[in-house]
Amino acid sequence: MGASLIILAAGQGTRMQSDMPKVLHRVAHAPLLAHAMQAGAALEPERVVVVAGHGAEAVEAAVAEIDDSAQVVFQEDRLGTGHAVLQARAALEGATGDAIVLYGDTPFIRPETLAAMLDARAAHGVVVLGFEPADPARYGRLVMNGESLEEIVEYKDASAEQRAIGLCNSGVICADAAELFTLLDEVTDDNAAGEYYLTDIVAIARARGLSCGVVRCAEEETMGVNSRADLAAAEAAFQARKRAEALENGVTLTAPETVHFAWDTWIGRDASVEPYVVFGPGVTVETGAEIRAFSHLEGCHVSSGAQVGPYARLRPGAELGNNAKVGNFCEVKNAEIGEGAKVNHLSYIGDATVGEATNIGAGTITCNYDGVFKHHTEIGARAFIGSNTMLVAPVRVGDEAMTGSGSVITSDVEAGALALGRAKQVVKPGLARKMFEKLKAAKAAKVKDKS
């Protein structure tokens, strides 16, 4: 029996000072909600239910992109966490096993922590995730009796003695899916905030004779995002963790603090990344590849031994073969660069296929866009594209063919052929000197008229 997930994502997040729902603000190029859903996905849940409220349509659209099997339900009135969870009741009708309640603005809880909560359910009717922060501040407190959880007390309702407790409530709770809702049926809003607290189910469970327990995690896992400052802190925390993970996995980072990863960046061992490299979503870098300084990669695949940069940009759909090179001030988009091929200087290769061991000269452009449609350029293996060649797509250059520097290629070039597409040079002796003299005289006359 797999667990089900209930992810609370209804809050507006007024401290964010934003029209966007809080859970859609991004860390490492992904919505906060995506991070929470990814952690839960590792459990292979039976069902996933997201409770939306503010900006529900935008949240629903984001959920569909992250996991199209997840169901979104709506909380019309924001009456507390207990009320929010109740909105998932119909969606979980008939679900077997346990339900875990997560929060869309708490992105860093590890799958291992959630698995530990499921394991702890063997001994307890309700399991709560707790942590011991450096500053307990206004967190709810977990009142323990040995290893048994007696109750959860919200800060505003806690006595001075209870506020002295260091073990705090993360809000994450695990219980049998069906029993969770029967417990919530007994929750009231008789508290200082006039809200239905999810945490009240602990006292209700104990009154029914159920044992309640706590699984502890590190404080950084429970980091919530409620403001732009929190968002920046979450980004910094993610990047620090991702950099440490890359180093641990055998990636060379010469200046780790300057490299920025996306949530799904994958880099193989013995790859190296120089300073000031930015990874957008969807990047895979294979073993032994080299990403040089000031490059930006997104939605691309870099094979073993390939070199990128410095100052290169790989856009979505870029595929670099083994030992391929994309150099300074080059941009590659939706294009395959074959094994050992080189695009070394000041070039744009878009919507194209470049064969193995082909050399693309400096300043080459695949002219792929006619203002309405994108068109494909195909360049064969071991071809030589001269500097400043314009390849007007759709066009094909065959294996071992060559284009002359400065050519505009508008029709196919057969294998082994040389194509020249430029005007014949004409030299007019002395004409440059005469033109400059004429222009300088005109300028001097214009200055005199103004005076």
Image (spheres, rainbow, N blue to C red):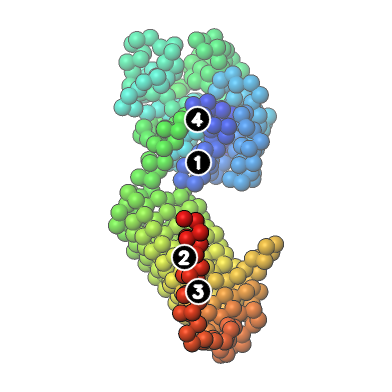
Q: Residues within 10 Å of mark 1 (few under 14, many from 20)?
A: some
Residue 359 lies, with reference to residue 196, above or below; the image says below
Circle 3: element type = helix
User: If you read the primary sequence from the N terminus, does the residue marked by circle 3 or circle 4 appear first?
Assistant: 4
* Amino acid bearing label 2: Ala
Tell me, yes or no, whether the two marked residues, 4 and 1, touch with CB atoms within 8 Å. Answer: no
How far is disc 2 from disc 3 in space, using C-alphas?
10 Å
**Horizontal and vertical percent for residue 5?**
56, 36
Circle 2: element type = helix
* Amino acid bearing label 3: Lys
Q: Residue 164 lies in what quarter of the image?
A: top left
Can residue 381 be seen?
no
Residue 444 shows which numbered tag? Answer: 2
Residue for point 65% across, 29% down: 74
User: If you read the primary sequence from the N terminus, does the residue marked by circle 3 or circle 1 appear first?
Assistant: 1
Circle 1: element type = strand
Tell me the quarter of the image containing the N terminus.
Answer: top right
How far is disc 2 from disc 1 in space, using C-alphas?
59 Å
Residue for point 46% across, 48% down: 263
Per the image, the residue denoted by label 4 is 16
Q: Residues within 10 Å of mark 2 (few under 14, many from 20)?
A: few
User: If you read the primary sequence from the N terminus, does the residue marked by circle 4 or circle 1 appear first?
Assistant: 4
**Horizontal and vertical percent for residue 266?**
44, 56
